[in-house]
Image: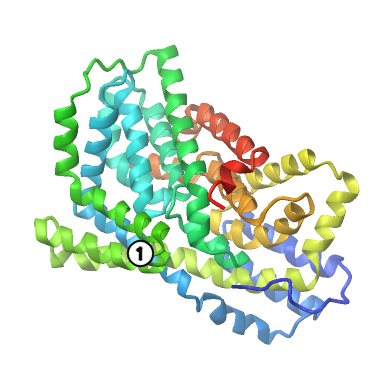
Amino acid sequence: MYNLYGIPEASTELGWSVGLPLLFMVALFAMAVPVWVALGFAALGLLWATGVLPLTLFGEALFSGIDAFALIAIPLFILTGDVLVRSGLSGKLLDVAEATMGSLRTGLGTSTVLGCGFFSCISGSDAAGAAAVGRITYKRLVESGYPAPYACALIASGACTGILIPPSIAYIIIGLILGISASTLFLAAAVPGVMIMVSIMLTNIVVNRRRGYENSHDRFSFRRWLAAVWDGKFALLIPFIILGGIYSGVFTPTEAAAIAVVTTIAIGLLQGTLTLADFPKMLESSAKVNGVIVPIIAFALPLAQTLAALEVPQTFVQSITAMTDEPVLIVLMMLVIFIVAGCVMETTPNIVILSPIMLPLAQEIGMEDIHFCIFMVTSLGVGFITPPLGLNLFVLSGLTGQSVLDIARRAVPYVLSMLFVVLLLAFVPALSLWAL
């Protein structure tokens, strides 16, 4: 837990000594400097310019910030997703999804989204889901009548569930920053995550009925469904172990991630779909992804602590409430901030930087902490299919060779449907607090 608000009051007034380092950070972002470098320079600049805290805080926070048991879950979930793909278990999940939804008029598209949801229950990562599902379903979607850019947009949108359906790396990080149990957030996020997935399915059905991309005539076969479930029983066992163990309180998210890694590796080795020669590549691939996330967390924490010591969150709350004290307007304002931030920056730095600043504003209008976390992460999730960053757009573009802008244009209906769900979550707290 990081008590970012337990720091003594600062005597430094907000001014250019605060503004210039933050503007410099934005300039570094614009020049495509690595995020962790920009965050580090901003933190050092604030500490040096304001003197609000000793410079030694920087080095201490870097190491103490990432010395957390909960963070171990991140590389383990990433590795689980990689093992799932290399062992062929991800294909089994998609087979179950297709057997379940394939008889619908838009069966292949709907089953693709459901497959993304299955994958999200294991990997906790958007990009991993987009890459895994995209490799398997893209050509089949195109052969079924979907235009190539739209097929990419459908997969990219479905993969947004990666950080929205538990176990989610984003909820592990925001829980760590705000001192909230990841298990509690996972439970609270179950309904919102499924709502996003269903909204994407329904959007695809509506678009299909208007444009006639796919017209499946397969009839549902219970025998085929049972055969697919039996064939994919080991793949389905993984999310059952992860979510069942966490929700029942048998083990923590970190322990669940460790058990998931061991289970997927054991299944792959026993089935012969995984060999010892695959391990170096799996570990290297997972280390690269983890090497992007953890430095951002490490360098963002001293920046967040410095901003808290300068009372930036309190100043921000006072500035907003001075303009309006209407809760609806404040919620909409937060939504715009999250959407814009999600368009230009990755989820991890957005969470680490914005959540300590925005939480006091949410509390000011009576929003529960858990409700705020669900609202924030779901809002940021829209950024995965919106330019200029739109990570899922770039993943699918790299896989298929389609233009990012063409994919983004076809993703507009999904952005709108996801925003509708975000607004429901914002103004109907029971959807996030149902398990409390």
Q: Is residue 400 left or right of residue 72?
A: left
Front-lying residue, 55 or 363:
363
User: In the rendered image of this protein, does residue 398 appear above or below residue 110?
Assistant: below
Residue 240's x, y, as percent? 31, 52
Question: Under tag 1, what secondary structure?
Answer: helix
Please state the horizontal and vertical placement of residue 328, each as a whole percent of the image.
77, 38
Query: Of 112 and 294, which appears nearest the observer?
Result: 112
Tell me the crowding category of disc 1: few under 14, some 14 to 19, or many 20 or more residues within 10 angstroms, Cα based.
Answer: many
The residue that mark 1 highlights is 256
Residue at 62%, 71% in the rendered image: 301
User: Which amino acid does the dot numbered 1 rest on?
Assistant: Ala
Q: Position of residue 237 (x, y in %)?
A: 25, 52
Look at the image and tell me in which quarter the N terminus lies.
Answer: bottom right
Which residue is at a point 35% across and 60% down the rendered structure image? 245
* Res 259 → quadrant: bottom left
Q: Quadrant of residue 296?
A: bottom right
- Residue 58: x percent and y percent? 64, 80
Can you say whether 27 is above or below 151 in the image? below
x 60%, y 67%: residue: 179
